[in-house]
Image: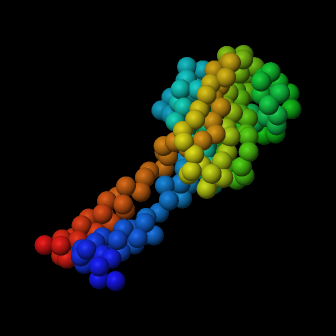
Amino acid sequence: MAGFFPSHGVMVVLALGLAMAALTPSAGAEPGHHVVGGDRGWDVASNIAKWSHGEVFKVGDSIWFAYSAGDESIVELGSKAEFDSCDLSNPIRMFTDGLNEVPLEGEGPRYFASGRPESCRGGLKLHVAVQPQEEAAAQAPVASAVPGGEAVLGADGPSVCGSHSLGVSFLVCVGMAFLRLFVA
């Protein structure tokens, strides 16, 4: 066995690498909180398609809609056909409070639109493809706008809930300190 590894340093590096890999949390492990439209919120002037370009929606995340309750409302629609045609006559849910959290509890498509038909037809709508935790963490970023300006999402991208870079940095520093002790 002595001839297999050139030095104790290599063994230490391998052990530290395995320990760091086992202790590093998955980037998709924490739920995300997505404010639809970013700083502008849910508004006709917002570019929902542009905002949503890098967003990833996973089971356990929440979507937050912020809007002027006097001027706007939001509906969740049950089908792609209703969404595409802005048929607001049979919503699953209506939101009218001005600030609403929508938990994403299951995977699959969700359809949101302005409660005002003219705003919906003007592109104020969002199609979200909710990914399972493990699938969202494994895919590359993909988002596309479809006619009407709404966004269709369904793959991984940056999370708005923060990152694990501090934990990874800490583990790397500890690993480097141990390596320095044994390889000097």
Instruction: Say above or below: 3 vs 129.
Output: below
The residue sitting at 37% across, 55% down in the picture is 165
Tag count: 0
Image location (x, y in percent) of residue 164: 41, 57
The residue sitting at 19% across, 76% down in the picture is 182
Question: In the visual, does 183 lie left or right of 65?
Answer: left
The residue sitting at 59% across, 32% down in the picture is 143
Question: In the visual, does 151 lie left or right of 50?
Answer: right
Q: Nearer the viewer, residue 60 or 76?
A: 60
Q: Residue furthest right?
A: 90
| Placement of the C terminus among the 4 image quadrants | bottom left
Q: Nearer the viewer, residue 80 or 11?
A: 11
Image location (x, y in percent) of residue 102: 66, 45
| Placement of the N terminus among the 4 image quadrants | bottom left
Q: Residue furthest left?
A: 184
> Which quadrant of the figure has residue 77?
top right
> Would residue 74 be seen by someone viewing this image from the given angle?
no
> Which quadrant of the figure has residue 12?
bottom left
Image location (x, y in percent) of residue 170: 31, 64
Image location (x, y in percent) of residue 176: 24, 67
Q: Residue furthest front?
A: 3
Q: Nearer the viewer, residue 177 or 52?
A: 177
Q: Nearer the viewer, residue 46 or 174?
A: 174
> Would residue 106 be seen by someone viewing this image from the given angle?
yes
The residue sitting at 68% across, 27% down in the picture is 125
